Image: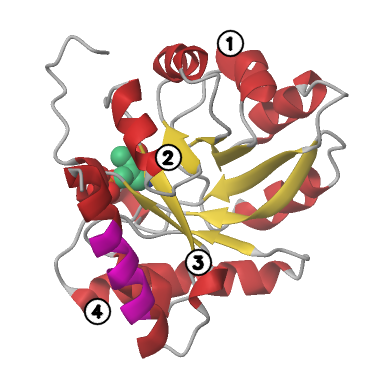
Amino acid sequence: MSTIAENIAKVGARIREAAQASQRDCATIGLLAVSKTKPAAAIRQARAAGLCDFGENYLQEALDKQAELGDLDLTWHFIGPIQSNKTRAIAEHFAWVHSVDRLKIAERLSAQRPPQLPPLNVCLQVNVSGEASKSGCSPEQLPALAQAVARLPGLRLRGLMCIPEPSADPAVQHAAFARLRTLQEQLNLDLDTLSMGMSHDLEAAISEGATWVRIGTALFGARDYGAPSH
Ligand SMILES: *Cc1c(COP(=O)(O)O)cnc(C)c1O
C-alpha cells in the first residue's frame, strides 16, 4: 500500500470513530482531500485509493493539475481566497467553492458560471475567530450576505465554512465549530453543508456537525512552501 493509501485508511478510521462517538452516520461526512502544493501524482494515488473530491487554494496550480489529470473523474473544490480577476476561471473549472466571503465575488461567480453546467455549489466562509483571522465575513454580515447569495441563479448556496484559529484545546475547537453550526441554523435557509475541520481538529468538527472535513497534511504529509512545484 502507498503511504497515501495508508493515510487515507487512517483518516477514514478517525472519521468513522468521530462519527460513532457523536452518533452520526459517517455517510453524511465527506472527505475533501486538500492537495495544494502536492503534485498531480499524489492526487492520482489518492484517486486510486478511493477519493474523488479534491480541494485547491491556488488557481493556476489547480488548473495545471486539472489539465494533467483530465483522464480521471474528479470533483474539484476551490477553498482559497478569491480575487475578482480569478472568478471566471473558478466558475468554469470547479464544482464547489468553499471560500465565498463577499457579495461582489458571489455575483461574479454566478454571472460567469457557464449555463451548460449545473449551478456552482458554494459555501460562505465565516470568520468565527474574531480579529485573529482576516478571511471570511463577520457573523454580523452573514445573514444579509446569505440572503443575497441564495438568490443568485448561477449558484447553489449549500452552507457555511470556517477556518478557526488553530488551537490544541478541544474546548476552543468545539466552540468555534458550534458557533458556525448555530449561525447556519439561525439563517433559516435550506442548507445542508458545514465545511469545517482540518487534520488537527476533524474530531471536534464532526462532533459539531461537519459535512465536509478538509484534510491536507494527514493525507499527503507536511507541505513544503519552498518547493518549486508551485
Ligand atoms: C490547507 C487547508 C486545509 C488543510 O489543512 P491541513 O491542516 O493540512 O489538513 C483545509 N482547508 C483550507 C481552507 C486550507 O487552506
Residue linked to disc 2 = 47
- Is disc 4 in contact with disc 2, using a CB cutoff of under 8 Å? no
Regarding ligand 1, which quadrant of the image does it lie in?
top left
Q: Which amino acid does label 1 sit on?
A: Asn
Q: Which amino acid does label 4 sit on?
A: Ala
The residues tagged by marks 3 and 1 sit, at their Cα atoms, a distance apart of 32 Å
- Closer mark to the observer between disc 4 and disc 2: 2
- The residue depicted at 42 percent of the width and 40 percent of the height is 47
The residues tagged by marks 4 and 1 sit, at their Cα atoms, a distance apart of 39 Å
| Quadrant of residue 121 within the rendered picture | top right
Residue linked to disc 4 = 171
119 left or right of 77 in image: right
Does dot 3 land on a helix, a strand or a loop?
loop
In the image, residue 212 sits, relative to residue 208, either above or below, namely: above
Q: Looking at the image, is mark 4 or mark 1 earlier in the sequence? A: 1
Residue linked to disc 3 = 29
Q: Position of residue 176 (x, y in %)?
A: 37, 68
Q: Which amino acid does label 2 sit on?
A: Arg
